Image: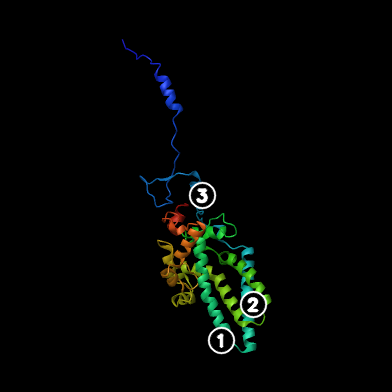
Amino acid sequence: MAILPRHNPTLKPLYHSRMTHHISPPRRICCSTATTPVKPRGDQIIVNEPSALVQNVATVSTRPVLNDPTLQSTWSHRVWVASGCTTVLISLAKSITTAVDSHIWIEPILAGFIGYVLADLGSGIYHWGIDNYGDSRTPFFGTQIEAFQGHHKWPWTITRRQFANNLHALARAVTFTVLPLDLICNDNAALLGFVGVCSGCIMFSQQFHAWAHSTKSKLPAAVVALQDAGILVSRSQHAAHHRPPYNNNYCIVSGVWNEFLDSSKFFEALEMLFFFKLGARPRSWTEPNSEWTEETESTSLISQL
């Protein structure tokens, strides 16, 4: 005959007491995408705060698709590009006309050259800023921030983006900035030359950027010649920007400033300043993860099949 254990009534209060005073450990959420340099056991990343996971998900760009309509130009895009080109041409035309009337050519030519050089510097600072700070929810700049940060994962999409689609945002900014100067300035050839060249280079910097991602065989001979001469940013120079540690070669007009800015650690100094003064941590300080890793065009398209 089986002997059943007798029930001990003293165990129930003890068990009840332990359950009553037991404090459950904090919940941990595991995800497979690395967002910090910490590497725990296996391939899992432990995130102590649920909000951290939500923030990371919100900043991931959407995978491009075949015949993506967001890469195509609209009539609104074309109008803004036409408007931007018109304001730039007005500045240049007024500068040339004034120079002819006054027989002074050296000053407007020199001013135009300075505008070209400073446009490259401006493109680098702007590119650095939207690569490292903010996300798609940032006011005014959110769309461009999302596009530039997603560009690191799918850089080939810029070659699929239609001309007006690629330039319209900068063309809009040029229109609102340059048009008032065109209306105010009438007899200052140097200022108009500077404004026309600088604003034109900034507006077309995204096209120069797209050419830097295109293969040599697909580019016009004139563009290849300008890249080889260093007048436009070259494909090899910009390719370094898309390799680890992803924190150099930001300038995308001619690239003439890249070597100086990188060797002098100019952007690193700005990042330290922003961090200590504003507490803003740049994206480049985070260990490169899947959001930085380039996904080739063939891999991206095959995954959609």
Q: Earlier in the sequence, mark 3 or mark 2?
A: 3
Specify the amino acid type for callout 2. Answer: Ile
**Looking at the rendering, which quadrant does residue 204 occupy?**
bottom right
Residue at the extreme right: 183
Query: Which three-letter amino acid code belongs to the residue tagged 3?
Result: Gln
Residue at x 48%, y 62% (from the top left corner): 273
* Residue labelled with disc 1: 106
Closer to us: 173 or 271: 271
Q: Rounded to the nearest whole Å, what is the CA distance between mark 3 and mark 2?
A: 45 Å
Residue bearing the label numbered 2: 90
| Left or right, 20 with reference to 70 | left
| Cα distance between the residues tagged 3 and 1 | 53 Å
Of label 1 and label 2, which has the lower sequence position?
Answer: 2
Residue closest to the eye, 253 or 8: 8
Which mark's residue is nearer the viewer, 3 or 2?
Answer: 3
Task: Provide the secondary structure element on which disc 2 rests.
Answer: helix
Residue located at (45% from left, 59% from top): 284
Residue 153 is at least partly visible in this image: no
Do the numbered discs 3 and 2 sit on residues whose CB atoms are within 8 Å?
Answer: no
Q: Position of residue 98 (x, y in %)?
A: 64, 84
Query: Which type of secondary structure does the marked residue at label 3 adopt?
Result: helix
Q: Position of residue 272 (x, y in %)?
A: 46, 61
Where does residue 109 sit, x and y in percent of width and height? 56, 83
Q: Residue at x 42, y 72 (%)?
A: 259
Residue 8 vertical placement versus 253 (above, below): above
Which amino acid, mark 1? Ile
Please give the residue where the numbered disc 3 appears in the rendered image.
Answer: 55
| Extreme residue toward the left, this view | 1
